[in-house]
Amino acid sequence: MTAPQDPAVIDDIFNKRFGPLLPSDPDTAPTNKKINAKKVQDQFKKLGPPPPLPPIPKEPPSNPNTIDSVTGKKDIAKIKDAILRPALTSQYGVTIGVPPAIMKFLPKAGGDQTKLNLSCSEAVLPGSNLATMQINNNFTGVTERHAYRRVFDDRVNFTFYVNADNYLPIRFFEAWKSYIMNEDVISENHTPKDKNYTYRVRYPDEPESGYTATGLTITKFERDYRGSLTYEFIKSYPISISAMPVSYDTSGLLKCTVSMTYLRYVVAQTDQFGMGNQEKPTSSENPNSTTPKSAWTSFDESVIGQDFSKYFNPDKTNSPFNQPLTGDPAGWSSW
């Protein structure tokens, strides 16, 4: 079946199916006058063909002289420098932070802090994740996730070799947990062996008798000491000691696995990744500690312990905020 070629027939079919086509501008066209289908076709012919679609973007050509080139040639020196020096899991160091109130248990357990640190045979570098909120209505077909909080793991595990002389790790961490539960204080003839034993847990941040510690660190380094990575844990203490099975079967090394909880951890950054110059590290919690401090801050002085009353002086003329800004105190130019 061939389509009708008469414009009048086409116009009649068009009007029956779609109704009369009103003019786009009623002020310039006669009222109640239909537009002929041939005129509509002529208008489309005057417009011409539609413009071509934009070309599909292509991958930019890679520079064969760069190490991140996909198609470029690479020599052996570049490959060795890029991937043939991986970090090994067997070079690390652990420092067990001990609160002052717990230090007395180390000699009683038959050791010192250095011996306890060296007996750590396995540690775990901690992890964290970002809690996000989901947004669906800002853009059509797009689901956004905005971060609003950083969530840390609730614990980090350490495994210690147990020495045969005095079982130092077991004795020390059991004494620490007993101190937290106040089991060393015997009142009214109540001892932990009594059937009706009662206890009262110590307060974690008491100045003289608190059980949380600063200085717990895990340092990852390499055999040539060219770089290191230090995780420092804030307010740590043991929350569990794993069961240690013993058997008459073939003898093996007795190991003690301790889970330490903490408030958060901080990764000590070197000058290469920090915002400012690398400073001599000190503990963020204990000024007398020799634990490396995180180099996150870019200011020349720490804001901790500073007197901020001068910034809220009612006399606005002497306020430092009204002085002209000089230099680059925050070190942002280094980014």
Image (cartoon, rainbow, N blue to C red):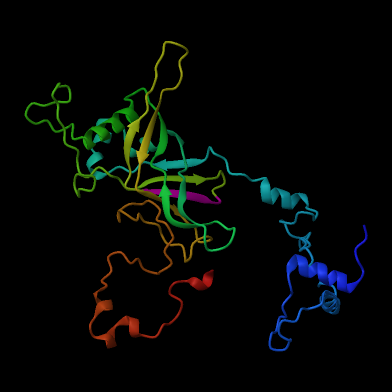
Position of 55 relative to 39 (above/below): above
- Residue 17 visible? The answer is yes
Q: Nearer the viewer, residue 171 or 54?
A: 54
Position of 85 relative to 299 (above/below): above
Q: Nearer the viewer, residue 117 or 217?
A: 217
Q: Nearer the viewer, residue 87 or 265?
A: 265
- Residue 119 visible? The answer is no
Q: Nearer the viewer, residue 315 or 140?
A: 140
Work out which quarter of the rendered image holds the N terminus and state it.
Answer: bottom right
- Residue 324, by quadrant, is bottom left
Residue 83's spot in the image, x, y percent?
Answer: 67, 47
Is residue 331 covered in magenta? no
Q: Main secondary structure of the magenta part?
A: strand
Q: Residue at x 74, y 59 (%)?
A: 66
Position of 271 relative to 261 (above/below): below
Left or right side of 176 for 55: right
Work out which quarter of the rendered image holds the C terminus and state it.
Answer: bottom right
The residue sitting at the left extreme is 188
Residue 264's spot in the image, x, y percent?
Answer: 38, 49
Residue 257's spot in the image, x, y percent?
Answer: 39, 30
Left or right side of 61 for 175: left
Residue 131's spot in the image, x, y percent?
Answer: 45, 51
Position of 44 relative to 117 (above/below): below
- Read off the magenta span: 226-233
- Residue 198, by quadrant, is top left
Left or right side of 244 for 196: left
